[in-house]
Image (cartoon, rainbow, N blue to C red):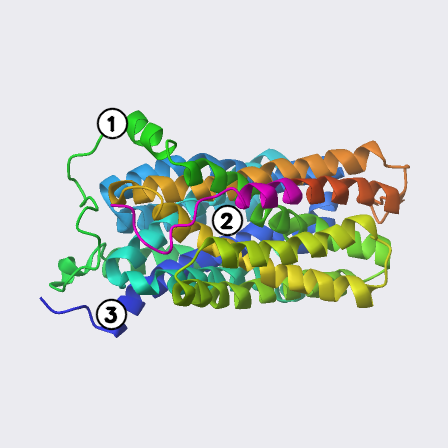
Amino acid sequence: MHEPPARLAYSVWALAAAFYLFGFFQRVTPASLAADLMRDFDLTAAALGNLSAFYYYAYAAMQIPTGILVDRWGPSRLFVAGSALSGVGALLFALGDSVLVAGLGRALIGAAHGMAWVSMLKLVTHWFPMKRFGTLSGLSLAVGTLGAILAGPPLRALADAFGWRAVIAASGGLVLLLAIAIKLFMRDDPRDRQFKSYAPASAPSRGSAQAPIIASLTEVFRHRNSWLLPIVNSGTCGAFLAFTGLWGVPFFVQQHALSVKQASTITSAMLVLFALGAPVFGHLSDRWRLRKRPFALGAALLLAGFGALAVFPAASLWILVPLLLAAGFGVAAMALSFGYVKESVPARLQGTATGVANAGVMLGTLIQMPVIGVILDAHWKGAIVNGARQYDLAAFQFALLFLFAWIAVSFALLLLTRETHAKQMA
């Protein structure tokens, strides 16, 4: 059998990446639409955090089931189901006349997108050689992050022109069309197209005999990295997404007197650096044959940037913004965690371990987003502007110190992980 042509392999990957991009777009839309959502649904900061976090609740809940299902059913089935479900969720979010309906829509999108990352890495394992895994993981994360960038100034401009509901509804229609394309053209493995597979010989094939689910999870958690890396991800990527995905824009608007468009430009720039950093760290990791060192280098940039933000939130933007951009570039190293964790367990448990690691990202964010809202509301002095609550510098500083503490603990735990040297456990 011949190896799959690059054009075919990248076509399969592109379908998965397109859905991942859509999910990232939906993940951070509340940041650009915060004032609209607070006005239309009469929300406090805590309520807005909870509405945004519905996505993360469902996403996190899907991680371990997805890791197990992708090992058993294959990724293409999950991509078809996920893209269809997320299209319906986007329509509910756009057309809902109550916060409960909007929250249900967000939850459906989160559950659907929760299938994307683990399934995409499974496709990469089958369609590309192992030596490209770090690079493809970073490139996948970069493409997804473009969706978050589109949810910044571009979404704000479209929402101003056509209304936020129309824009979100249109995005739902597009992903329903993507579901049809995935059904027609995506395949789990090159062998389905009569080509050679890159999957490890010990990796399970779809429908093959599997250990019981509880037994698989128990075995995964016997390995140190499998429980450390989810916690690390909760504080690195989780905190970064809580800030860029929701609270960064209100912070810059209320504390540095920026417009929503200017504030979203800063958070979008952080996401641009995140997108650029992911393939860079992936390439370095593959070249050095190391996971821990480049991950720690990136996490240190994040720690420094958010440390400055938490301690000196009123500092000049000429100081804060470059540090936050460096943090955005550094946190992209978390893309290495997925190769890191899958190499830390037997190949037959790769999907399960990857799902557990990805759950950490969402668990961090889904806790941090509403807790930050609670902290802000606890220190609210009663100010309201254009129907939305305004919070003072002290309130934001308490919230930012909470984020920084979480990042610091996660960084310390990263240092306790065991290097795999980019080699799959036997």
Q: Residues within 10 Å of mark 1 (few under 14, many from 20)?
A: few
Label 1 sits on residue: 212
Residue 169 in view here: no
| Residue type, numbered disc 1 | Pro
**Membership of 331 in magenta stretch:** no
Q: CA distance from mark 3 to mark 2?
A: 30 Å
Q: In the rendered view of the protein, which quadrant contains the N terminus?
A: bottom left
Front-most of residues 158 and 347: 347
Q: Residues within 10 Å of mark 3 (few under 14, many from 20)?
A: some
> Which of label 3 and label 1 is nearer to you?
1
| Residue type, numbered disc 3 | Leu
In the picture provided, is 389 more to the left or to the right than 338? right
Label 2 sits on residue: 90
Tell me the element at label 2. Answer: helix
Q: Residue 261 placed where, x, y %?
A: 73, 64
The disc label shown at residue 8, or none: 3
**Membership of 421 in magenta stretch:** yes
Tell me the element at label 1. Answer: loop
Residue range highlighted in magenta: 407-426
Assess whether mark 1 and mark 3 are in contact (beta carbons under 8 angstroms). Answer: no
Sequence-wise first label, 3 or 2: 3
